[in-house]
Amino acid sequence: MVVHHYVPFTSNVGDLFVRDGIHKRLRETFPGVQIEEFPANDPHKKSGRAVGLEGENLERTNAEADLVIVGGSNMYQGPDWRFVTSVEAIEKLQVPLAFIGLGVGSIRGKKARPISERSRQEIIASHRKAIGVAVRDVDTVEFLAGLGIEATLTGCPATFISHEPLKQGQPKRVLVSAPPERFLPKWGHKGYFSGKVMQSTFEQVLGTLKASGADFDVVAQDAQDMKYLPPFVSRFGKEPLYFGMETTKYLDLFREADLVVCYRLHMAIASLGMGVPFLLVNFDQRTAAFRNTFNAADATYDAFGFFAQRRLAGAVRQWQQPDAVLHGAWRKAISRRDELWNVTQSFYASLAQKLAS
């Protein structure tokens, strides 16, 4: 069994959590499977490889693969979706195709831009040809329904890198996944003052943890964040932890934590899979969709809202004794996760059945 997996080319390790989740399910479903990765896109032309399902990649896939997987990440974001292909290439594809873990929604807090007509036609043609379409959140189900495409809501594949019960007991170890550099306040830019609110609360979070004597660390998810983090966190006696694109080191860190303050969506997703309580900062539509999918509103705090950020600071001050509201939010998220775990298992089983028939 050979799978060609078209993966977003990225400097954000969170996208690779999604890849890892997909690969784990594939290896469980198809023992002995060989998985080869291809860049699904390359907006900054850094991969040094042929990109997307077309040209030489299409020829190789038709010649070698038994199944093509496209996913995950924010590939449906407009105006041009982030999978390099064409209607003509899709028509020439001779191998079964599935989409797993893709999502829609702005990654910069703004409204999602309408999809271009060319991308609309490519999405419709490819998804109607697919033997399975699994998406990460409720917003994406609605987006595809608007194109006449039925999708299975499985949650983000990164959720199922692990599947552990909710951690109980007195929390001792805290991780803070740092805010993306692009959301820091920049003088003269729109949103400067709301950005200052977010940054001020981030400082309060670190100050609270330091003053309480907590065993805590600050984690960077993207190389861009290392531009500002070292001097920022040095005031709190810390050096940021950054492991490049080595997903295992990040996941081991999060597995050992008792609480994670998440300024990064995929850190919250991975924590949910591991049963680690989280406080999630909502920057954009992707995070809001995760919140709504997993019933996690009471553990989510809008990044640029003054009162929401005050709630976040208060929750961190009580990190050793979380209140009943937070415990309720975590239990609801775990319950929803377990429900979608069963849907995910059924989805992969259906792929196996279709390939065998």
Image (cartoon, rainbow, N blue to C red):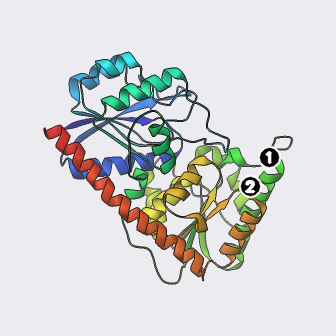
Task: Tell me which residue sits at (71%, 50%) in the image.
Answer: 228
Q: Position of residue 332 (x, y in %)?
A: 48, 70
Amino acid type, residue under disc 2 in the picture: Phe
Q: Nearer the viewer, residue 3 or 235?
A: 3
- The picture quadrant where one finds residue 197 is bottom right
Q: Position of residue 22 (x, y in %)?
A: 35, 47
Q: Which residue is mark 1?
A: 191
Q: Which residue is mark 2?
A: 304
Q: Position of residue 183 (x, y in %)?
A: 71, 47
The N terminus, quarter of image: top left
- Is the C-beta separation of discs 2 and 1 under 8 Å? yes
Q: At numbered mark 1, what does the secondary structure look like: helix, strand or loop?
A: loop
Amino acid type, residue under disc 1 in the picture: Gly
Evaluate whether residue 279 shows in this view. yes
Vertical arrangement, residue 101 with respect to residue 54, above or below: below
Determine crowd level at label 2: few under 14, some 14-19, many 20+ residues with C-alpha closer than 10 A. many
Disc ID at residue 281 = none
